[in-house]
Image (spheres, rainbow, N blue to C red):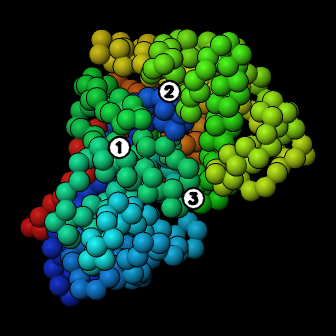
Amino acid sequence: MSESLLERAADEFRRQYGLPAAFCVRAPGRVNLLGEHTDYNGLPVLPMAIDRCIAIAARPRDGRRVRAVALDWGHEIESFELAPAIPKHPQGHWMNYIKAGMQGILAKLCPDEREGMTGCDMVIAGNIPAEAGLSSSSALVVASAMTLLHVHHRTVGRLTLAEWMAEAEWYVGTRGGGMDQAVCLLGQPDHALQIDFFPLRAQPVSWPKEYAVVLCDSGVRAKKSESALRAYNFRSAECRLAARLLNQALARNGWESQFQRLGDLLRPPFHFSYTEIRDLAESALRDTYRYSELVQALGEESRVIEILRDCSIPGDPGDSGPRFHCGKRYRHVAREALRVVKSRELLDRGEMEAFGELMLEGHASARDDFEISCPPLDQLVRIAMESGAVGARLTGAGFGGCTVNVVRRDQVKEFLAAVRSHPGLPPSITHPGMIFPVNAAPAAAYYPIS
Ligand code: GLA
């Protein structure tokens, strides 16, 4: 599938620019099997790179201009000049992801190197459904950065590049963690990855070949550029506020050190276990706080406002504004991290029924405590379980997008038929092609033009 994508990008390149491309880059999307909204809290995730990709055909050009055509988004040539602070396209435009990746590289170079950076021409093709929770945006960010690096014969270690790209993607306005960029750069065929953060580490986890991963796209579009972006950033703010509240609880118990992200508690001087982190998160916080209660608990309004502003939430929301569900959010995060650690052991032992149970628990927790599900996703999880899946849950940031389902490989055909003909299928699923198996795919790479 990606072969033909690369060819499509390369053929179109010649047609658009009248010259052959010099090289291609392919970057995979991902499905997250477990560990949702844990990454920016410094806790592990268990994603898999998938055989749905972004392909870029490119050729260096003189001057600082970058020109790009996206085959599936309008065929228009868009362009910009490489600069330390590249002005944005309108919010939600695909060019912003290219700008994010390239600006992310420029940001790490010294001024002399930055000055010397010339641009390129690009054609982009892809088959990752957009805004479906499969990380098409990070694949584009990573592929664009790799394009610029290759134009300048530069190599950067994959772990380092993944860290750069996680930060680079903040350019588009989401305060995301580092999972998507890391799995895109480090994924392996036949394997999921356990990824840990701060510092970034990835360990391949062998995926049992008797089981398939099937995605069901709810058709509900989680527009990162609009309300889902605000909701995502709000979750991130709630977690940061929860950290401050928990630090106070620790201080009351005699701890002098402070932690920044929940995952820091695994390390010195704390050395908590995952279970201890969960117990603390469950016991030390209230489910929900009003704004004034937060300010009172934390003692400094300016700190609260600073955290909100840092997560792109303007001003003082006051008590008439939203509630802050710090306890519920941290309960999900801490329990979810424990599920990732357990799930890895279950995969190593091939205990897939128990793995499926954890997926269902993860979905319930994402729905009830992190509140990132929606009725079509819940319905799809129910339908999948009635149709023979061993486990099912929403995947990615939530608020729409896909569910991930684990199905015995010898039952995939029956599963697909049962889901597609289920009378309860959400009306947002307009096409049987929205339910499809995926395979664990290799990490992003360069390809010569054939
Ligand atoms: C998005 C972000 C990731 C991660 C997931 C939720 O995909 O980009 O960093 O936070 O949401 O698990």
The three-letter amino acid code for the residue at tag 2 is Asp
User: Seen in the image, is 15 located left or right of residue 75?
Assistant: left
Residue 329 in the image: state x and y as whole percent. Answer: 66, 30
Residue ID at (32%, 82%): 64
Q: Earlier in the sequence, mark 3 or mark 2?
A: 3
Residue 289 in the image: state x and y as whole percent. Answer: 81, 32
For the residue pair 245 and 256, the one nearer the viewer reads as 256
Q: Name the image quarter holding residue 113.
A: bottom left
The relative height of residue 148 versus residue 53 in the rendered view (above or below) is: below
Q: Which residue is mark 1?
A: 182
Residue ID at (25%, 25%): 206
The three-letter amino acid code for the residue at tag 3 is Gly
Residue 193 in the image: state x and y as whole percent. Answer: 32, 32
The number of callouts visible is: 3
**Residue 316 appears in the rendering:** yes
The relative height of residue 185 versus residue 297 in the rendered view (above or below) is: below
Marking on residue 264: 2
Q: CA distance from mark 1 to mark 3?
A: 19 Å
